[in-house]
Image (cartoon, helix red, strand yellow):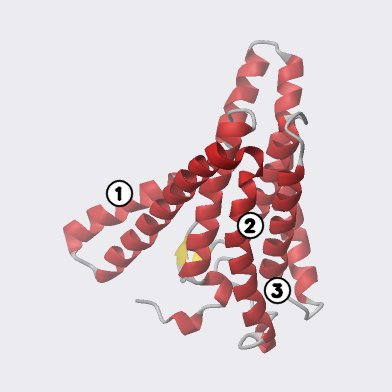
Amino acid sequence: MENSKEFLECEKEWVYHLLIFVAGWFGAYTFFLRGGVFCNAQTANVVLFAMALGNGEWSRAAYLLLPIGAYFAGAFISESLEKSVRRFHLLRFETLLIGFEALVVVLLGLMPAEWPDQICQVALNFICSMQFNTFRQVQGVSAATTFVTNHIREVGYYSARYLQQGRAEDRRRFGVHGQLILYFIAGAVVSTVSCRMFSYRSIWGSVIFLAIVFAGLFRADTGAEKEMREKVPHGH
């Protein structure tokens, strides 16, 4: 097991568990209530965009550029701002990002049901992209906090390696990725139940978990890691 003291608070397992739980919440929410789509990643939208081009559906192709463009913008802006924010010596970029994400989610919960679903979709595309680009490694293991495709692949890969070679490190990585998948599923389950009970306001439930992450990162930024605000997380 890696020594957790080598890593910043924003790289700890508990942070990734809660963030991917929220990602599962977002996925179920947008599919259940906001247009029947998943906004955490863009593979499906790129396929639909290509199909629209192939069918000569120019207006639909242009429409699909909105979520794809929002995802691009999230990665571009987060990468552009990160180094600038570190120079201010206030809070880490990761902390500010989670605070911003929580604010966006609160506003989305206030959005009237009759407003276009695309507003919610594009907003979540944007913040998920920023989060995906910012949180890259959980205690030395490459990981994503917004979708589980690669985690499923890694579970298969490291479980096979462990059965073949019996290395403890492969077992650890298998466990890390497996736990992230389970937290994502749990978030989607809780979100589905919440959608049935609270409808469009159910997205506010995810703010509880974002607030916990924000509080933990804020405490680290102003306490134990106060002199480490310029330290770059692993994977950057």
Q: Mark 3: which secondary structure?
A: loop
Is 170 on the left or on the right of 2, as rendered?
left
The residue under label 2 is which amino acid type?
Val
Q: Tell which tag, 1 or 2, sits nearer the viewer.
A: 2
Which residue bears the numbered disc 2? 207
Gap between marks 1 and 2 measured at Cα: 32 Å
Between disc 1 and disc 3, the foreground one is 3
Q: Position of residue 216 (x, y in %)?
A: 60, 75
Q: Residue at x 42, y 47 (%)?
A: 185
Q: Residue at x 74, y 76 (%)?
A: 91
Percent from the top left, x then y, of residue 147?
Answer: 51, 47
Asked where in the image residue 94 lies, by quadrant, the reply is bottom right
Query: Quarter of the image containing the N terminus?
Result: bottom left
The tag earlier along the polypeptide, 1 or 2, is 1
Badge 3: few (under 14), some or many (20 or more) residues near its Cα, within 10 Å? many
Residue hosting label 1: 156
50 left or right of 119?
left
**Badge 2 local density, few (<14 within 10 Å), some, or many (20+)?**
many
Q: Circle 3 sits on which residue?
A: 92
Type of residue at label 3?
A: Arg
Query: Residue 123: horizontal and vertical position, in percent?
Result: 73, 43
- Secondary structure at badge 2 equals helix
Is residue 171 at least partly visible in the picture? Answer: yes
